[in-house]
Amino acid sequence: MTYALVLNSGSSSIKFQLLDPNNSATDEPFASGLVEQIGEPLGRVILKYGGEKHLLEEPIPNHSVGLNRAFELMSEHGCGPAQVEITAVGHRVVHGGILFSAPEIITDEIVDMIKDLIPLAPLHNPANVDGIEVARKILPDVPHVAVFDTGFFHTLPPAAAIYAINKEVAGENGVRRYGFHGTSHEYISQRVPELLGKPTDEVNQITLHLGNGASCAAVRGGQAIDTSMGMTPLSGLVMGTRTGDIDPGIVFHLYRTANMSIDEIDTLMNKQSGIKGISGVNDFRALAEMIEDGDPDAWLAYQIYIHQLRRYIGSYMISLGRVDAITFTAGVGENAANVRADAMAELEMYGIKIDPERNALPNSGPREISTDDSTIKVFVVPTNEELAIARYATELAP
């Protein structure tokens, strides 16, 4: 049996999965794991394989050592590169700019082009490049494929993609809406037509990727026409630690009045705001417990979150004109029944009716949570970005 290896390299971590991209019976990986705390005094490599969890703890100074240790741990337990046939390696790359609209076979030239995009994603693309360069050295005879988080949103019409600022300044600095979580939104938008029993090009839908980072997209006939994240993953919905949409004048106000530096404002808006900024926590389970205990800040944070989510759902219903389905995915979207219920509350006049019993069921795969007579169907569909990347990599591999 052949497998695709999927790598998601972060600044201090590497997530990896070994998948059969052609397995339609289950989305579960053959093996999966995580290298974490790279560059810290003590790192960890975690491997899940054969129903068991294996752990290695030692200093991991860089990505090269981390990936090598991961392969050694896999080999030790019978699922290493020499023991299973790896036909392709898929790499998640956060930012493809306007250069990349589809997955690409990785060459030296492609790596250089991804490096050129680092100013657009300074926290993500450098780590993505590290993972690519290390993996190509370790597995030089296997095709490597880059799958871009922004690629799905290459179809945005100009009215949705272009910001109303001076066009020369925007053009010189790459300022436009790029969108993120694209692999997830694309995966979900391909699964929903299957659930509806309709061709993809006949389905209009709103996809809601709600995790610690959150975004939504309007998809017409399989093509994205709008999305909430913009030039960076900071805009749009309220998130775990990120502001979502705010008045941009707040940045100037904090700079001039609070004497905050640009870096301090960046940290504030990306890491100290959102749900955490209001309530003190960014985990929705902790937030729910605080609400149960009557914490007013937790309740306010939740209300702000729902308010912004409903604003986007409403605006995308107008943009699409006709909506066939609304789908929740990712950690919060798949597991927080209260978020789904409150986001869809009192929308019967628009043909949206939620079945409370269906909505309350635990996360157990794709399912409908709307009533049988709901004009707009509402679904919960677990996302699987890794499987999507594995399929792209396998399709492109020569």
Image: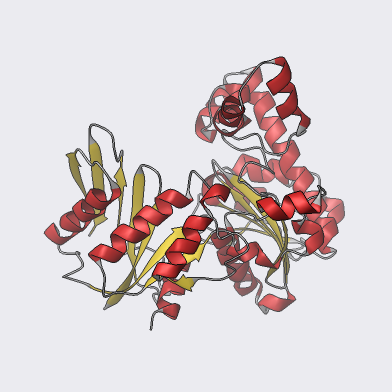
Q: Does 361 appear above or below 325?
A: above
Q: Left or right of 103: which side holds 8?
A: left
Q: Looking at the picture, how far across and down is residue 34, in whole percent?
A: 31, 49
Q: Does 88 appear above or below 337?
A: below
Q: Looking at the picture, how far across and down is residue 59, in whole percent?
A: 20, 38
Q: Left or right of 363: which side holds 73?
A: left
Q: Does 23 appear above or below 386?
A: below
Picture colour scheme: secondary structure
Residue 207 occupies which quadrant of the picture? bottom right
Q: Left or right of 367: which side holds 110?
A: left
Residue most toward the top?
258
Q: Looking at the picture, how far across and down is residue 303, in whole percent?
A: 71, 31
- Residue 398 seen from this side: yes
Q: Residue at x 48, y 43 (%)?
A: 123
Q: Left or right of 25: which side holds 74?
A: left
Residue most toward the left?
76
Q: Quadrant of the N terminus?
A: bottom left
Q: Quadrant of the C terminus?
A: bottom left
- The answer to which of 90 and 28 lies nearer the viewer is 90
- The answer to which of 165 and 266 lies nearer the viewer is 165
Residue 111 occupies which quadrant of the picture? bottom left
Q: Looking at the picture, how far across and down is residue 139, in whole percent?
A: 25, 68
Q: Residue at x 21, y 67 (%)?
A: 81
Q: Residue at x 42, y 54 (%)?
A: 128
Q: Residue at x 72, y 55 (%)?
A: 171
